[in-house]
Amino acid sequence: MMTQSGHVPLSGALVERLRAARRILLLTGAGVSAESGLATFRGPDGMWEGRDPMSLATPEAFAEDPETVWRFYAWRREQAARAEPNPAHRAIAALQQERSGTSLVTQNVDGLHERAGSPETVRLHGSLWRLRCTGGCGEDEDLRQDLGTLPARCACGELLRPGVVWFGESLPQAAIAAATAAAESAELVIVAGTSSVVYPAAALPELARRHGAYVVEVNPEATPLTGRVDEALPNPAGTALPALVRAAGVRFEES
Ligand code: BV8
Ligand code: ZN
């Protein structure tokens, strides 16, 4: 039996789980911020000055050309500062506020979940807004303002770096532990707006499924995960998340 929620048809099995699940895990990626106007990492608009972001988000790229890598991150900070959270971010925050067993794990570094009012966010890949000293003086701060001359420098004279996790770097231990625990205990997992190609984040839905979770994917495009979920919703996150949250019995106003 299908239930229609807005323009999103949801199966009876999914609606039942949305209503009954005490532990829900939301795993989000760049697609959740696409409707806020932010380019996804691998999308058609994902290029920056003709370069693939994959080639810039590495320690090697930073070591070789810190100014170019910093210009890429300064541009992304400007885009993110101008963007507003969309109905997907707000619906997730509403669900977290209403249902205490809900966890949010994100690969996004833009801070839009926090700005939408999400009470707790496990950030697997760090934050665009954090700056860390590469020189070992221990400086690690949250700085929103303009960075001035690039590459940004610490008061100690060494280079600052963006507080994100680059390819080949380890994820923050506490974030991995929290995400793993949430996946192992979730009854329902909603994976939204991710291409599911970056590990270890991409392994979380599989882990949850092995522990008995019902896994739903929200993505207009097929991904390597699509064939391995219980249900795939080919809708944009800004439409699907409000529908899912309402089907869970949470009141949610769009604006
Ligand atoms: C690590 C932060 C241990 C910085 C990012 C071979 C096999 C397996 C693994 C590996 C391998 N070789 C190397 C690895 C490891 C590597 C990896 O996974 N590589 C892959 C690509 C092969 N992983 C790592 O290196 C990780 N660390 O493993 O540590 C280790 C250490 C040393 C040596 C070995 C191991 C660290 C990875 C962290 C990379 N950091 N971001 C920054 O942002 O600048 S990466 C980047 O990818 C993004 O920023 C994001 O965080 C992440 C995932 O991207 P998505 O969010 O999924 O975005 P994407 O653009 O891809 O997709 C958007 C989706 O949205 C699309 O599907 C689209 O259809 C959809 N969409 C669009 N519009 C909408 C929508 N959906 C819904 N609604 C819409 N409106
Ligand atoms: Zn320093």
Image: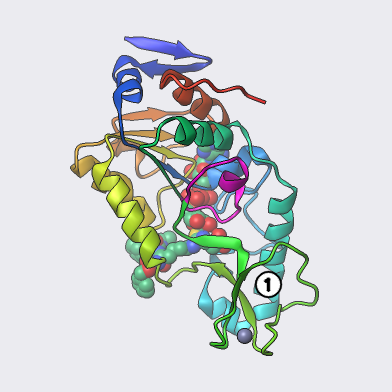
- Residue type, mark 1 in image: Trp
- Residue, x 56% and y 61% (percent of image)? 127
Task: Name the residue beneath numbered marker 1.
Answer: 70
Mark yes or no: residue 1 visible.
yes
Residue 231 occupies quadrant: top left
Placement of 120 over or under 242, stated as above or below: below
- The crowding category of the residue bearing disc 1, from other C-alpha atoms within 10 Å (few below 14, some 14 to 19, many at least 20), is many
Residue 245 x, y percent position in the rendering:
46, 25
Placement of 225 over or under 146, stated as above or below: above
Quadrant (top left, top right, bottom left, bottom right) of the N terminus = top left
Quadrant (top left, top right, bottom left, bottom right) of the C terminus = top right
In the foreground, 51 or 32: 32
Mark yes or no: residue 219 visible.
no
Residue 36 occupies quadrant: top right
Q: Look at the magenta stretch and give its main secondary structure.
A: loop
Q: Is residue 223 shown in magenta? A: no
In the foreground, 235 or 177: 177
Q: Which residues are magenta?
A: 106-121
- Residue, x 80% and y 77% (percent of image)? 149
Kindly give the residue lying farthest to the right in the view shown: 148
Placement of 44 over or under 55, stated as above or below: above
Secondary structure at badge 1 equals helix
Total marks shown come to: 1
Residue 215 x, y percent position in the rendering:
31, 35
